[in-house]
Image (cartoon, rainbow, N blue to C red):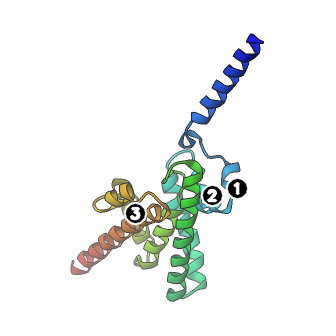
């Protein structure tokens, strides 16, 4: 009987240790992404599973999505779609962050995708402007100048995940507008 008690105690200890592993330590898999629509959206269809620089891949995904949206709709419809997918992203990131135990997991890249689609909507025509917009957006998203860093640290929910990238989009559009104005002066 004594051996049975020790065995039960060891099993209970192992179960407790397994439960003590934080959800944040679990690496999301393709199965996780496809297990719930919110995960699929937050990980941008699996783009967030990229082995390196998932935010960059999420930003790159915005190009073909925006090109299709731009080719099939007018400006008002585009803005309406962007508002809708922003709200969808807030819900998806909230739900997925809760499932992972991390409010803003690096693989949740829908925020980059949506925010950069907004940038593309207002970027001057031409591939050089789009490349500049991409580089500036990634810079602002990574560096997080004020107040982006503040909101990134304080808004720990789905809206916050989406909102800090919206601010990076604003910085990007401001920088592009200044660059365009300087070029026109020269």
Q: What residue is shown at x 61% (from left), y 35% (from top)?
A: 19
Q: What residue is shown at x 30% (from left), y 70% (from top)?
A: 175
Per the image, the residue denoted by label 2 is: 39
Look at the image and tell me in which quarter the N terminus lies: top right
Mark 3 Cα-neighbour bin, 10 Å: few <14, some 14–19, many ≥20: many
Which residue is situated farthest in the left direction here?
Answer: 185
Q: Is residue 14 above or below residue 151?
A: above
Q: Is residue 103 above or below residue 38?
A: above
Give the image location of residue 103, x and y in percent: 49, 53
Per the image, the residue denoted by label 3 is: 164
Q: Earlier in the sequence, mark 1 or mark 3?
A: 1
Q: Earlier in the sequence, mark 1 or mark 2?
A: 1
Give me the C-alpha separation between circle 3 and circle 2.
20 Å
Q: Which mark is residue 34?
A: 1
Q: What residue is shown at x 63% (from left), y 62% (from top)?
A: 38
Task: Give SS at disc 3.
Answer: helix
Mark 2 Cα-neighbour bin, 10 Å: few <14, some 14–19, many ≥20: many
Q: Is residue 10 above or below residue 80?
A: above
Give the image location of residue 112, x and y in percent: 48, 62
Mark 1 near mark 2, Cβ–Cβ under 8 Å?
yes
Look at the image and tell me in which quarter the C terminus lies: bottom left
Task: Give SS at disc 2.
Answer: helix
Q: Nearer the viewer, residue 83 or 174?
A: 83
Give the image location of residue 184, x and y in percent: 26, 80
Q: Earlier in the sequence, mark 3 or mark 2?
A: 2
Task: Give SS at disc 1.
Answer: helix
Give the image location of residue 56, x and y in percent: 48, 56
Question: Which quadrant of the view contains residue 136?
Answer: bottom left
């Amino acid at each position: 009987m004594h051996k049975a008690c020790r065995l039960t105690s060891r099993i209970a200890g192992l179960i407790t240790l397994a439960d003590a592993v934080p959800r944040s330590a679990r690496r999301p898999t393709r199965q996780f992404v496809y297990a719930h629509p919110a995960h699929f959206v937050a990980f941008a269809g699996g783009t967030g599973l990229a082995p390196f620089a998932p935010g960059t891949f999420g930003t790159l995904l915005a190009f073909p999505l925006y090109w299709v949206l731009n080719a099939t709709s007018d400006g008002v419809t585009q803005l309406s779609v962007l508002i809708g997918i922003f709200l969808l992203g807030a819900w998806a990131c909230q739900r997925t962050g809760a499932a992972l135990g991390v409010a803003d997991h690096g693989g949740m890249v829908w925020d980059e995708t949506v925010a950069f689609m907004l940038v593309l909507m207002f970027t001057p025509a031409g591939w050089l402007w789009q490349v500049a917009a991409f580089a500036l957006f990634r810079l602002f998203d990574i560096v997080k100048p004020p107040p982006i860093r503040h909101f990134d640290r304080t808004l720990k929910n789905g809206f916050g995940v989406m909102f800090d990238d919206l601010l990076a989009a604003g910085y990007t559009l401001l920088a592009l507008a200044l660059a365009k104005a300087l070029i026109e002066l020269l």
